[in-house]
Amino acid sequence: MRSRSAGHLLVEALIAQGVDTVFGVPGESYLAVLDGFHEHRERIRFIGCRQEGGAAFMAEAQGKLSGRPGICFVTRGPGATNASIGLHTAFQDSTPMILFVGQVASDQRDREAFQEVDYRQMFGPGTLGMAKWVGEVHDADRLPEYVARAFHTALQGRPGPVVLVLPEDMLTHMTSVPVLPRVQPALAWPAPGALRDLRALLLAAERPLLIAGGTPWEAESCKALQRFAENWQLPVACGFRFQDSFDNRHPLYAGDVGIGINPKLAARVREADLILALGVRLGEMTTGGYTLLKAPRPAQKLVHIHAGAEELGRVYAADLLLQASVSCAAKALETLAAPPAVPWIEWALAAHADYEANHLAQAVEPLDMAVLVKTVQRMAPADTVYTNGAGNYSGWLHRYVRYHGMQHHGRTQLAPTSGAMGYGVPAAVAAALLHPQRTVVNVAGDGDFLMTGQELATATGYGAGRGAGKLISIVVDNGSYGTIRMHQERDYPGRVSGSELFNPDFVALARAYGWAAHRVERTIDFEPAFATALAATLPTLIHVKLNTDVSTTRATLTAIREAARQREAS
Ligand SMILES: Cc1ncc(C[n+]2csc(CCOP(=O)(O)OP(=O)(O)O)c2C)c(N)n1
């Protein structure tokens, strides 16, 4: 085996894992790796981003889209701190991801050398919710072992982010060790006895509800889930921001259990006598703040199926716990013999009828977000990827986009269950770069957009959205951090502080980045603007002006404030 630097070896190891694109911001701490990317530029590309938060979000989106770890490279101290938002998102969203961090040279360690941080302390598993594992590589010959372990750890059990720390001097050591083969994650199958118990619980149920979500769903497991649901006529809801786990057009679809949940679905979750939670973590957002399922002992019978042993029994005392990968669980469930008839047909039909009724919206003038979102889905190709960050504006996507199950076009919803603002733009840029044939539509709030809007330059620089697939970002400008304003009006009516925004001219800003841009102030002007964007040869930003008072898909700020004042008065 020829000798080369560990930096080159690392790039070869990534290629052996099937990686062809990585995201990052360069730093002097890992020059040998950057040189490796130059060496192997025909087989792997380094997308240089404009801020590590953007790069880490892009890698997270890569992990969501591919089911394999998204890869991000950043420099020490400032680079790693900027990247932490993407790491946190990958953790909360159970997305496989590896963050490589350049580190000070070994002979400088522990002096608080320039930009030195102890990443085991900063991101370590003891720190709730940042990384599954933090490894530091001190021996160039062992780099393949660390990389393979990073892939396994990111993919197995509950998927998530891993950090590999790379001391600068280690990267320049010469080594002749070979790379290891592509990692295939070990899968966990449900035990036959547990499946029998699950069947018995189903047979005893009258109002069951399946909640699907988490990761890693893909085409085959989504198909298996659908067959299981059909065999048993089970109504299926999706967990918060996992709306593409089950086809929203299917007659058994009941809606999503997340922020802005359909009140009828919330009632149905409470009324259910059996909740079958498949792949979802049963976190705060999917349980309505642990109220739809009362913690720690729910009123409903609860079966929780999850790949991570640590998730089972984390909060809830369930009636049955199954540790299994979602793909294995779904395949096992579809073989579960269903009775000739189930007693909950009416219940299942009503669940879907409630979902359909929730699609109807009261008209809003002059700009109707419900119509806007429905227009996007009517006009955009069926395999369009939708991205968003955090903010009330995302409620219109959650409520009105009918996400297709992953058996149709893979993942089409890139949205942070972590509630990280700024996610949508970089996720969209990553999706457009990774799938140039597919159209990507980002919807961002005005606050949300400017957290990572600099990545428009990355899109322009790397030619995203210039081919068959379009890249479109719709900025919903209500002149405020509207979600926070909503909370203020609810808890401190009329006392607005810190949530008003001064915005730039978004059209001029987008054009300065080399994007096409349009402004829309009325519903009727949206369709022509979106048609122009779908025909454009440049990525396009559509700046949508929304009245600040339009707060959520269901309420205005005025109504929220008045209700709060009445509560105060009574
Ligand atoms: C990185 C980050 N910072 C702060 C918050 C808290 N936060 C949640 S929503 C929100 C306001 C979002 O404003 P905007 O994007 O304009 O959307 P809107 O709510 O107005 O629709 C804020 C500040 C967050 N979720 N993420």
Image (cartoon, grey):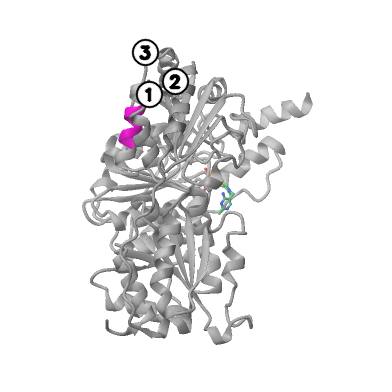
Residue located beneath label 3 in the image:
341
- Residue 184: name its quadrant: bottom left
How many other residues sit within 10 Å of disc 2, few (<14), some (14-19) or many (≥20)? many
User: How many marks on residues?
Assistant: 3
Q: Are marks 2 and 3 in contact (CB under 8 Å)?
A: no
At label 1, which amino acid type do we have?
Leu
At label 3, which amino acid type do we have?
Ala
Task: Report the Cα–Cα distance between label 1 and label 2.
Answer: 8 Å
As for residue 543 lying within the magenta part, the answer is no
Q: Are marks 1 and 2 in contact (CB under 8 Å)?
A: yes
Residue located beneath label 2 in the image:
351
Relative to 92, say whether 524 is above or below.
above
Residue located beneath label 1 in the image:
252
Q: Earlier in the sequence, mark 1 or mark 2?
A: 1
Is residue 180 shown left or right of residue 398? left
Q: Which residues are magenta?
A: 222-228
In this rendered view, identify the residue nearer to me: 310 or 256. Answer: 310
Q: Secondary structure at mark 1?
A: loop
Q: Position of residue 194 (x, y in %)?
A: 46, 32
Relative to 46, say whether 509 is above or below.
above
Residue sitting at 28 percent across and 62 percent down?
Answer: 463
Q: Secondary structure at mark 2?
A: helix
Q: Closer to the observer: label 3 or label 1?
A: 3
As for residue 225 lying within the magenta part, the answer is yes
Is residue 528 shown left or right of residue 296? left
Residue sitting at 59 percent across and 73 percent down?
Answer: 117
Q: Earlier in the sequence, mark 2 or mark 3?
A: 3
In this rendered view, identify the residue nearer to me: 194 or 486. Answer: 194
Residue sitting at 29 percent across and 38 percent down?
Answer: 407
How many other residues sit within 10 Å of disc 1, few (<14), some (14-19) or many (≥20)? many
Q: Is residue 479 visible?
A: no
Q: Earlier in the sequence, mark 3 or mark 1?
A: 1
